[in-house]
Amino acid sequence: MDTDVLIVGGGIAGAATARELARAGIDALLIEQATLNAGASGANAGSLHAQIPHPEFVSLGEDWARAYAPTIALKQASLALWHELGAELGPDLEVATKGGLLVAAHAGQMRDIARKGAIERAAGLAVEMLSRTELLRLAPYLAEDVGGGAVCPVEGKANPLRATPALARAAVAAGARIRQGVALLAIERRAGGGFIAQTSQGPVRAGRIVNAAGANAAAVARMLGVPLPLEGFPIQVNVTERAAPFMDHLVYYASGRLSLKQAQNGTLLIGGGWPAARDAASGRLSLLPQSVAGNLAVASAVVPAIAPLRLVRSWPALVNGTADWKPVLGEVPGVPGFYIAVFPWMGFTGGPIVGRILAELIAGRDPGFDLRPFSPARYAHSPVAA
Ligand SMILES: Cc1cc2nc3c(=O)[nH]c(=O)nc-3n(C[C@H](O)[C@H](O)[C@H](O)COP(=O)(O)OP(=O)(O)OC[C@H]3O[C@@H](n4cnc5c(N)ncnc54)[C@H](O)[C@@H]3O)c2cc1C
């Protein structure tokens, strides 16, 4: 299993990186401890985001939002890649970008939405304020008493059950190797450069390693004594029975956590980062009934047609989260050949650009972005996770 580049993690970040490396003619082996798409990439709500998340804008403030704003360029570039992937890998990915609507519950919230929009526009994102009348004209399915909102035309959705497997198939077709059921256990640095990765299937010699282990990326970084203050946060998503198509936007709410969209098969995906539970001893995830109820109540308040629909399924999963919400991308200073490929919180959206950037860096080319805000160097003085 020796390789030039060993990619750890078979989620969207790892699969996209494998595909890009193989297309660049670089030898790549991806190992996944479980099965492809077993982590957040196959359990997320399928939103393709571009805007600054509203709840965090309100709770963390404008300074945080300005520091986060360079991430918008990455998300926009990723959205462009999503369209290319949709065209190349087929309609199964269900890539559609009919716009994201941030809905205010009352006129008093329009000020926050406008302040956020100003930061987004300064970062190059098209965001347009909408009066209540304009919003209801665009989205007649919204509750009549909404207070107005904003539209971000580039946002949308894709199918998380299909995207990573499709990227992985494309990676293999381009020459990458993928091994499922292979866990990385430890990493040693070799004297002359490169690494020996100890895996559950034996040692692998690798010239470079890409840490695309999602919520487990801090543990993989720790194998080399590298600090990466990233955690897995348990959150949950709900899906309803099918309904005739009536909404094609991605909908957010300024008065409660919500990401809402109708999938191509008619089901409504209702999420927004509501907490799930994790058993401290076993690590086992379970649903929080109050999160299910709260999330559905918010969704029905914004889109009344949801209220009579039956809930078909709810599930918890771990999202990879960093405190500053910014991606962590690039080679770790002082550990040549060890790369981090983490797009937290909204990493389904970010997967394609993570793969492109990592492959460009590994190929020694300019990825075309100022990556300083996303450098692993920002954690140089953080403690290594216990
Ligand atoms: C419920 C939920 C809803 C979400 N909704 C959205 C959304 O709508 N839009 C959006 O953009 N983002 C969303 N996200 C976030 C998004 O899903 C993640 O940020 C993204 O999928 C992370 O991709 P990844 O490839 O980095 O990690 P993952 O998909 O978690 O993949 C990492 C893989 O690494 C493997 N691994 C870990 N350690 C090892 C090891 N030692 N050896 C081998 N393999 C290892 C794991 O088994 C896993 O398969 C959501 C997340 C959750 C949980």
Image: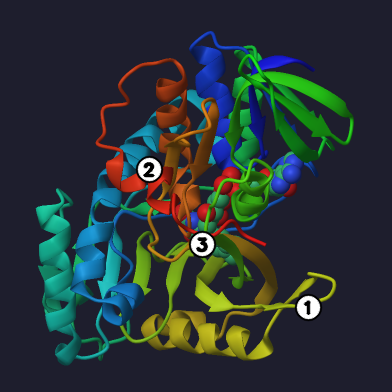
Q: Secondary structure at mark 2?
A: loop
On the image, which quarter does residue 108 sit in? bottom left
Q: Look at 75% across and 29% down and name the residue there.
A: 197
Q: Nearer the viewer, mark 2 or mark 1?
A: 2
On the image, which quarter does residue 131 sit in? bottom left
The first of marks 2 and 1 along the sequence is: 1
Question: Where is residue 36 drawn, in percent x and y?
Answer: 72, 40
- Looking at the image, residue 104 sits to the left or right of residue 36; the answer is left
Q: Which residue carries the number 1 mark?
A: 279
Question: Which residue is nearer to you in this view: 350 or 358?
Answer: 358
Question: Where is residue 115 drawn, in percent x and y?
Answer: 12, 73
Q: Pick out the residue farthest to the front.
A: 191
Question: Which residue is nearer to you in this view: 254 or 246?
Answer: 254
Mark 3–mark 1 distance (CA, rounded to whole Å): 18 Å
Identify residue type, mark 3: Gly
Q: Look at 62% across and 12% down and name the residue there.
A: 27
Q: Which residue carries the number 3 mark?
A: 321
Question: Which residue is nearer to you in this view: 123 or 66?
Answer: 66
Identify residue type, mark 1: Asp
Q: Secondary structure at mark 1?
A: loop
Question: Where is residue 270 drawn, in percent x and y?
Answer: 52, 72
User: How many numbered callouts?
Assistant: 3
Query: Is the residue 207 above or below the residue 100 in the image?
Result: above
Identify residue type, mark 2: Ser
The first of marks 3 and 1 along the sequence is: 1
Mark 3 residue crowding within 10 angstroms, few (<14) / some (14–19) / many (20+):
many
Q: Which residue carries the number 2 mark?
A: 375
Q: Pick out the residue farthest to the right.
A: 201
Q: Look at 40% across and 36% down and name the residue there.
A: 353
Mark 2–mark 3 distance (CA, rounded to whole Å): 16 Å
